[in-house]
Image (spheres, helix red, strand yellow):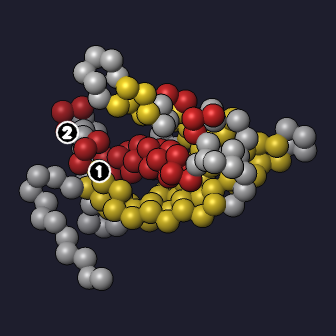
C-alpha cells in the first residue's frame, strides 16, 4: 500500500494516487494490484479509506452550509472534521474501474455532526447494470482544539 518517499524518508500511500474526487459527492477509483488482498479482490481497508475520503468531502460541504461559513476565511479546515464512526457492508466483488457516490442521511441541529452514506459501485458493461460493491454509513463530527474528548462507555 505504501511507497517510500525519497525526499524525507516518510511513507506515502499509493491508495489515493488512483482516487479522484469528481464532485462533492462523487469520485472515481482505478483498482491496481497494490490495492488487492491475498485473494485478488479489492482490500476492505482500501474501500474504507475511499469511503472516508469522499464522505469527509461531503461532510465538510454540509457542515459549511450549516454553520453559514461560506467565505474562504471562514471555511472549515478539513482537520476539524473527524470520522467518528463507520459501518461498512461488503456486498460484491470489484472491477478495475469503480465509482463512488455519497449522500447525506442526517445532519443535526447542533451544526456539528452529519451522517453520510457512501456506495462503491461497479458498472457491469455486459448488461449495463450497476452493482454495489460495498456500502458504508459514516458519522462525521466537527472538532477543534477547544473540543473536549468524549468519553465512551464500553
Q: Residues within 10 Å of mark 2 (few under 14, many from 20)?
A: few
Between 14 and 144, which is closer to the camera in this rendering? 14
Tell me the quarter of the picture where residue 140 sits: bottom left
Mark 2 against mark 1, which lies toward the viewer?
1
Name the residue at 53% across, 33% down. Answer: 19
Q: Quadrant of the C terminus?
A: bottom left
Q: How many numbered badges does the structure rendering display?
A: 2
Q: Looking at the rendered structure, which numbered label has been put on residue 81?
A: 1
Name the residue at 47% across, 47% down. Answer: 49
Distance Cα–Cα, label 2 vs label 1:
14 Å
Find residue 14 and report its horizontal and vertical position in percent: 47, 31
Farthest residue, direction right: 127
Q: Residues within 10 Å of mark 1 (few under 14, many from 20)?
A: many
Farthest residue, direction left: 146
Identify residue for label 2. 74
Considering the numbered disc 2 on the image, is that residue within a helix, a strand or a loop?
helix
Find residue 55 and report its horizontal and vertical position in percent: 45, 50
Query: Can residue 107 be seen here?
Result: no
Farthest residue, direction bottom: 154
Between 74 and 114, which is closer to the camera in this rendering? 114
Tell me the quarter of the picture where residue 113 sits: bottom left
The reply to whether dot 2 and dot 1 touch (C-beta < 8 Å) is: no
Considering the numbered disc 1 on the image, is that residue within a helix, a strand or a loop?
strand
Name the residue at 69% across, 35% down. Answer: 97
Find residue 4 and report its horizontal and vertical position in percent: 37, 26
Query: Can residue 108 be seen here?
Result: yes
Instruction: Specify whether 83 is left or right of 125.
Output: left
Pick whichever of labels 2 and 1 is earlier in the sequence.
2
Does residue 59 sit above or below 13 in this rendering? below
Between 136 and 41, which is closer to the camera in this rendering? 41
Find residue 100 and report its horizontal and vertical position in percent: 59, 44
Q: Looking at the rendered structure, which numbered label has been put on residue 92?
A: none
Amino acid at each position: 500500500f505504501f511507497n517510500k518517499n525519497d525526499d524525507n524518508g516518510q511513507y506515502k500511500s499509493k491508495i489515493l494516487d488512483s482516487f479522484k474526487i469528481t464532485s462533492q459527492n462523487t469520485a472515481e477509483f482505478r483498482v491496481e494490484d497494490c490495492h488487492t488482498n491475498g485473494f485478488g479482490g479489492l482490500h476492505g481497508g482500501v474501500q474504507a479509506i475511499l469511503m472516508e475520503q469522499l464522505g469527509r468531502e461531503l461532510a465538510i460541504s454540509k457542515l459549511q452550509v450549516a454553520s453559514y461559513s461560506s467565505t474562504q476565511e471562514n471555511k472549515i479546515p478539513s482537520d476539524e472534521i473527524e470520522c467518528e464512526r463507520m459501518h461498512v457492508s461488503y456486498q460484491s466483488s470489484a472491477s478495475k474501474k469503480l465509482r463512488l457516490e455519497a449522500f447525506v442521511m442526517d445532519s443535526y441541529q447542533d451544526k456539528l455532526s452529519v451522517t453520510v452514506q457512501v456506495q462503491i459501485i461497479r458498472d457491469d458493461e455486459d448488461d449495463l447494470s450497476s452493482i454495489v460493491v460495498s456500502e458504508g454509513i459514516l458519522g462525521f463530527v466537527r472538532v477543534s482544539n477547544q473540543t473536549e474528548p468524549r468519553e465512551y462507555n464500553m
